[in-house]
Structures are given as structure tokens and as C-alpha cells.
Image (cartoon, rainbow, N blue to C red):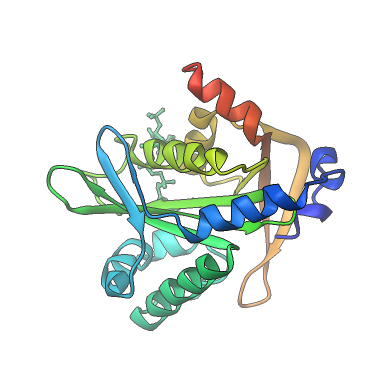
Amino acid sequence: MNFRELPVPALQAAKVDHHSVERFIGGIKNFKVLETPRLIMRVLALSDTPSVHEILGPPEVHKWNYLFRSGFSLEDAHEFVQAYLSGQAQGIALCLLFTDKIKRSVLGEVHAVFDPGILAADIGYSTLADENVRGKGYATEATRAFLQGLCQIGLQHICLTAAPENIASQHVISKLGVPQVEDVSLQVKDVDGCMHARNLYYMGAQEWCAGAQAGLK
Ligand SMILES: CC(C)(COP(=O)(O)OP(=O)(O)OC[C@H]1O[C@@H](n2cnc3c(N)ncnc32)[C@H](O)[C@@H]1OP(=O)(O)O)[C@@H](O)C(=O)NCCC(=O)NCCS
């Protein structure tokens, strides 16, 4: 995502000082673990490849990811983990796997790609395609904690996208309290060259975090 090209005035006008950028990149590189009431969230390791495949492998899940629309093999899962580990080492991406605190079973993942130059993040998430996992608030709980963690290291801009027909994802974003940018339909190209519409959601991160601390999100 080229954040500067999005039709969001706050992103187009974004200016950040060098110190804040350094602090943010350092925070991403050193990001390790988060805890929520029900979840342990931790940075991916290469040994998590089978879990990532289990989460993102079903067509019902990876069809929303335009990079993997035509399939998501174990090799793709390996590449995904490597790409996020390498992205984290550069301060431009981060993926956390989240597990049930008590049972230790893997439930899902939450990830972000950053433009550290303007402290902006594009956030995504998936949970296991299992009726005992979906609809229990796990994606919302994990993404809320992730955003709070990112705010603490200085994130300034939160962006999310969702396909107009992806109702579950839109529910998550609505529960997080990030508003849709009205009258905007992004077009994203998948690996096969087909274009897909995406709704865009944006909020200033510090404003979001103030609301989250006040219990509004
Ligand atoms: C989107 C996704 C991560 C949500 O995970 P989850 O753990 O079930 O999310 P939550 O339980 O926190 O919230 C989901 C909400 O959507 C609602 N929902 C789910 N499917 C729905 C549907 N078809 N119609 C209406 N509401 C639906 C749930 O009821 C819940 O809302 P509620 O708490 O108000 O009842 C999961 O469905 C998923 O992995 N989908 C495939 C990958 C994906 O779409 N990722 C996002 C790409 S933008």
C-alpha cells in the first residue's frame, strides 16, 4: 500500500521527525509478546510455518489476500513467515500469532505493513476457520491489543481495508471503532491480474488509542 497516495488528507500531509521514526523502527524490531485477557500474542518464528498454513491455507481465508488468491501452500506459508521476519528486521512489517492463553492452541494471526517514514500501518488479521474459534471476538481482541502496542511505540496512522462482501472483517473493524473513508473504493490487483474493490478505513492512531484507553473501543 502506498499510504501517501490514499485519499486521506492526514496521510498526504503527514510529517514526522527523525527521532519518532527511529523510536518506531526500534519498537518494531524489538516487538516480542503481548497479552490480552484470553490470548498470548507473539512474533512468528520459522517453526510456526505449519500453523500459518493451517490459518491461511483454507481458500475461504486466503481468497481475501490478493497475493495468495490462487492458493496458499506450505511453501507459501514458509515464504510468508520469512517475509514477515525479514520485514520486522527492517522495521517495515510485523506479524503476531495468537494462541489461547490456557489451552495454548493457535487461534489466528494479526499483521501489519508499515511506512515507518510517516508512522502509518496497514493492518490485517485471520482466525482459524473453525466454528469453535470464529465469532468469539478473538480477531477483535487481538487486533485491539496489537493497535495499542503499536500506538505505544508511536504509530500515527491506522489503515485497514476490507472487501465490500467481507462482512466478518467489516464487523471487526466496526467493533474496533475505525471509521470507513466515505465514497472511496480502492482497486487492488491480485496475483492473476484481476482487480478487486476494497473499502478503506482510516483513523489517527493517537486519537484511536485515547478512545481505547477511555474504554470506547
Ligand atoms: C474476519 C475474521 C478474522 C474474523 O475473525 P473472528 O475471530 O470471527 O472475529 P470476531 O469474532 O472478533 O468478530 C467477527 C464479527 O463478525 C460477525 N460475522 C461473522 N460472519 C458474519 C456474517 N457472514 N454476517 C454478519 N456478521 C458476521 C460475527 O458475528 C462477529 O460480530 P459480533 O461480535 O458483532 O457478533 C475471520 O472471519 C477470518 O479469518 N476471515 C478470513 C480472513 C479475512 O477475511 N481476513 C480479513 C481480511 S480484510
Q: Is residue 186 visible?
A: yes
Residue 64 or residue 35, whichever sits in front: 35
Which residue is at a point 29% across and 35% down the rendered structure image?
136
Residue extending farthest to the left is: 103
User: In screen coordinates, is 96 left or right of 149?
Assistant: left
Residue extending farthest to the bottom is: 75
Whole-percent x, y for residue 176 in the image: 51, 31
Residue 56 or residue 47, whichever sits in front: 47
Number of residue marks? 0
Q: Quadrant of the N terminus?
A: bottom right
Q: Is residue 72 visible?
A: no
**Relative height, residue 110 to residue 76 (above, below):** above
Which residue is at a point 29% across and 69% down the rendered structure image?
48
Which residue is at a point 69% across and 62% down the rendered structure image?
188
Ligand 1 falls in quadrant: top left
Whole-percent x, y for residue 97 in the image: 34, 56
Residue 152 or residue 85, whichever sits in front: 152
Whole-percent x, y for residue 137 in the image: 34, 34
Whole-percent x, y for residue 56 in the image: 38, 64
**Relative height, residue 131 to residue 206 (above, below):** below
Which residue is at a point 83% across and 45% down the rendered structure image?
15
